[in-house]
Each structure stands twice: as C-alpha cells, then as structure tokens.
Image (tube, rainbow, N blue to C red):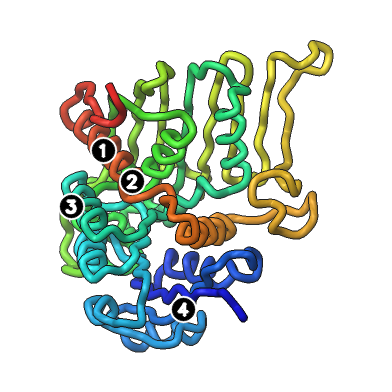
Amino acid sequence: MSTRKDLRIGIIGTGFMGRTHSNGYSQVSHFFPELQYRPILKAVCSRNAEKVQTFADQWGYESVETDWRALIARDDIDAVDICTPNDSHAEIAIAAAEAGKMVLCEKPLARTVAEAQQMLDAIEKAGVANTVWYNYRRLPAVTLAKQLIDSGKLGKIFHYRANFLQDWTISADVPQGGTGTWRMDVEAAGSGVTGDLLAHCIDTAMWLNGSITDVSAVTETFVKERMHAVTGKVQPVGIDDACIFHCHFENGSLGLFESTRYARGHKALYTFEINGEHASIRWDLHDLNRLEYFDHRDEGIVRGWRSIHVTDGDQPYMNKWWVPGLGIGYEHSFIHQVADFLKSLETGEPCSPTFQDALETQKVCEAVLESAASRSWKDTGVGTT
Ligand code: SOE
C-alpha cells in the first residue's frame, strides 16, 4: 500500500514565477521519488478567466479561480503559493495563514518591513509551514559554497562582494505599472532594484556569511518620469534604478553590493566573491554549474584558481540528475526548493528561507533605502548585536 501523501497546491499568479513554480511542482516527484509528499496541481488563480484557463490547460491544473479569496476558501487546497506582484503578498499570505493553509511566497516577502512583520505574525499564529522563493540558494554550486564555508575551509572571512546587473529598463519608453512592468511602479513593487535584485544577493549573503548589521547606500533613479500603464498618465518614478551599498557583517567582514537595471549588455549577471583567510570562492549565474575556488594552502607549484564543475553525484543535489559532467539549469533551483519544502513537511523542520529569514532580508533592504535617502549609515536591526 502506498504511503504517499498528496499536497494540494493552489497557486495565485500566472506570470514568469507562476511558470517556474509550476514546473517545480510538475517535476519534483520524478526526480525525488523517495519523498512522502507529492504536489497535486489543484487550482490556479488569476483575474483574467481566459488566460487562467489557458495556463491551467498548459500546466495541468485541475481547476481555475479568478478570485484569490475563493481559492483560499476551498477545502481541497493545502498550500497557497503566491506569485502575484508584491503589493498583494501581505493580504493574501495573511488570509491564507488565517485559513490554516501552508504558504509559499515569491520574493521579496513584502514591500516593507511592517508588511513582512504582519505576515510573519500571521504565519506564527497559525503555525503553518512556510517558505519564500529565494531560489538561488538551491543551485548546486551555491549550496556547495555554503558547505565549503561551513566546513571552515575559507577560515575567517574578510570580504563579501556581490553584483546583480540587468539592462531591461534603460529605455524611457518602458512604462511603470500594469502587467509585465509592475516592477517599475513603486506602489506595486515597494522599491526598484533593492527589493527585486539586491534582495536575492542579501538573502544569499546572510545565508553564507551571517547577519548584515549596518549599511551605507547610494541609489539613483535615472529616468525620473514614466507613463503609467494603467492610468496612461506620465508620473514621477518612485523606484531606485540602481543601488550600491557597503556594509558590515556580524562576523567582522565587509560587504560591497551593486545592482542596476542600466548595465547595458547584462541580462541577469548575478555574481558573488568571498575572500577568507585561507581561501576564496566566486560564482557567476551565467555559468551556474561552476564554482571557482582558490586555496592558499595548496602546494605552491600548482596553486591557483580551481574551476569546479559542480555536476558530480557527491555534490549538492547532483545525485538526482543525469550523470556526472552533465549540467542543470536555473529551473532546477525551483525544483530543489519544492523538494526541500516537501521534505520539511516530513521532518517538521522549517524550510529556509522561512518568512522569519525573509523578514531579516527585508530589514536590510529597508535600511539600505533609508540610508540612501538620509545619506547616512543605518543599523539593520538584524543579528544579535
Ligand atoms: C527581474 O527582472 C527578475 O525577474 C527578478 O524579479 C527575479 O527575482 C530574478 O531572479 C531575475 O530577474
């Protein structure tokens, strides 16, 4: 007799993230067959009836809703997955938690710390399982970086450097608001590159290197007015187009972070480099299966940067895929997050990043924006000091 348990998913939002998550749910049981829980694509919700039906047909969802409240009210949904623009995360997550549903929320958790705190309070009150989709943690090379750091191979860490560069908003004709361009509208997104891109870098950084305690930032909005896709009016732009900050980590190391959507030629260049007393590591999303590693303790005549192709069965997640030497892609980070979430339901352990972890990232983002606005250093309130 099968001991398999169904986890009935209700997903809200059918954009880019709706697709990455749906792919994760669809693939996970094929590659992680040992997991007790199996996602069932029960319902998908979006306001446009025709589009949501097309999405359901394409991905195999059993049913559709056009009102997220109706989806949350259903008895046949165990977990609500929020893939909507940031301005609806808080309302949906709180309602879902109050209805006793597990909640998976796309990043960033919210627009502000205040919203994120309310979401965490609701989750904790309801005692429901939760996770936030900071997916890059679950690329094998990034997870290997975590293992190397935790094993002490780098020794004391001095520097953490990260960039996330894109170029899709340079044209002044890109509108703000509306489908596809809501990330340009401060009301919908909460912020610009800080919440959208630096939040990824901050999540990875605090996972790998501990709490960021204080920050000093500068932001710029290069195009000051844009047409709003919903109102049709030209309105002031409220988001940060570029953000650079430096910071202290609780472990004494220094951090330097840069993000922009105005770096012509870069579509999604996420890189980090960490320098420790004995060794350094660096990673680049454009070559996502590779981790570069330099160890000063290597014999002098062969000392140099090693280029580790993270595709071997004893490297993180890789025993689930193909054979050594064959790479995997961006989409696998989402499959791994679903797998880890399902595993957490078996073990009862939290699936990081939890709402609590994502609140800490939100605090750093907010301190970054406040620092830039006030041209002063800001404490993040994260960590123990
Ligand atoms: C923005 O363009 C974006 O799609 C982010 O919203 C994602 O979180 C990032 O992973 C890729 O870029």
Residues 356 and 224: in front is: 356
Comes first in the chain, label 4 or label 1: 4
Say whether residue 116 is left or right of residue 348.
left
Amino acid carrying label 2: it is Ala
Which quadrant of the figure contains the C terminus? top left
Please tell me whether mark 1 sits on a helix, a strand or a loop: helix
Distance, label 2 to label 3, CA atoms, is: 13 Å
Label 1 or label 2, whichever comes before in sequence order:
2
The answer to whether 199 appears left or right of 306 in the picture is left
Q: Amino acid at mark 1?
A: Lys
Give the residue pinned by disc 1.
363
Q: Residue at image x 55%, y 29%?
A: 150
**Percent x, y for residue 352?**
43, 48
Q: Nearer the viewer, residue 226 or 216?
A: 216
Say which amino acid is labelled 3.
Gln
For label 4, the crowd category at 10 Å Cα-Cα, with few meaning under 14, some 14 to 19 and many 20 or more, is: many
* Residue at left offset 29%, top offset 38%: 365
